[in-house]
Image (cartoon, grey):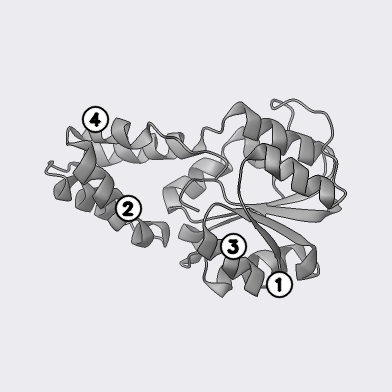
Amino acid sequence: MLATPVELLPRLAGLARVPVGPFETAYWAHRAAYDAGGLDAAYWDAVVTAAGGTPTDALTRTLTAADCEGWGDLPRVSRLLLAELAAAGTRLGLLSNAPLAMARWVRGADWARCFEHLVVSGEQGALKPDPVVYGLTGGLFAVDPARVLFFDDRTENVDGARRAGWDARLWAGPADCRAVLAERGVSPAAATASQPGRGLESPPMSATGPGGRG
């Protein structure tokens, strides 16, 4: 959600030396199992084979790294929003449907410091909109569910969050997010994306999804 890398799939297909169309179809067809904790090799072997390519261990490593970098390289506008919210003391949580490799990558990213808690489906074995992941995330913050402001780019995930009692909104970009935050009385502090902020003590909490797949 915070990153929507439109050139990622063509780049991955190019690395695999297969046509983009069948690669993209297989990429999404097998993604849920991967995001639920599936192994890198099992996922990329299935995707590359379905697209007419030849999977190898080296290709798996290459595709895994490129996939993580593609989803994890946030645009400046998203980095700035996170930095300002963190600097203002807003408690931030990341709830993402993403594989184990992405979970490891995110924890090493500079912008991850903005978040108090990171909940990634690959580590939990459950995907949004499973109630389990909302319960887990809410429990980490120990606040009234009605105080949780959640953004996601998928309607089913927003609906799942609302069933958990959260104030859930469909993501429409950083500008819309700022407007919603203003309605809630949250004013992001001026900050730079290279300085993600200090402590994260003050509510409300904003839980966001990091990638275009929810």
Is 124 positioned to the left or the right of 165 in the image?
left
Residue type (three-letter) at the residue carrying disc 2: Trp
- Bin the neighbour count of mark 3 within 10 Å (Cα to Cα): few under 14, some 14-19, many 20 and up: many
Separation of residues labelled 3 and 2 (CA atoms): 20 Å
Secondary element at image label 2: helix
Quarter that holds the N terminus: top right
Secondary element at image label 1: loop
Residue 158, label in figure: 3
Secondary element at image label 3: helix
- Bin the neighbour count of mark 1 within 10 Å (Cα to Cα): few under 14, some 14-19, many 20 and up: some
Separation of residues labelled 4 and 3 (CA atoms): 34 Å
Is 122 positioned to the left or the right of 85 in the image?
left
Image point (78%, 40%), residue name: 85
Residue that carries the numbered disc 2 in the rendered image: 28
Specify which label sits upstream in the sequence, 3 or 2: 2
* Residue situated in front as seen by the camera: 61 or 129: 129
Image point (64%, 36%), residue name: 111
Question: Residue 3 at x, y = what percent?
Answer: 53, 38
Question: Residue 23 at x, y = what percent?
Answer: 23, 43
- Bin the neighbour count of mark 4 within 10 Å (Cα to Cα): few under 14, some 14-19, many 20 and up: few
Residue type (three-letter) at the residue carrying disc 3: Val
Separation of residues labelled 1 and 3 (CA atoms): 11 Å
182 over 189 or under it: above or below? below
Residue type (three-letter) at the residue carrying disc 1: Gly
- Bin the neighbour count of mark 2 within 10 Å (Cα to Cα): few under 14, some 14-19, many 20 and up: few
Specify which label sits upstream in the sequence, 4 or 1: 4
Is 38 positioned to the left or the right of 152 in the image?
left
Image point (35%, 62%), residue name: 33
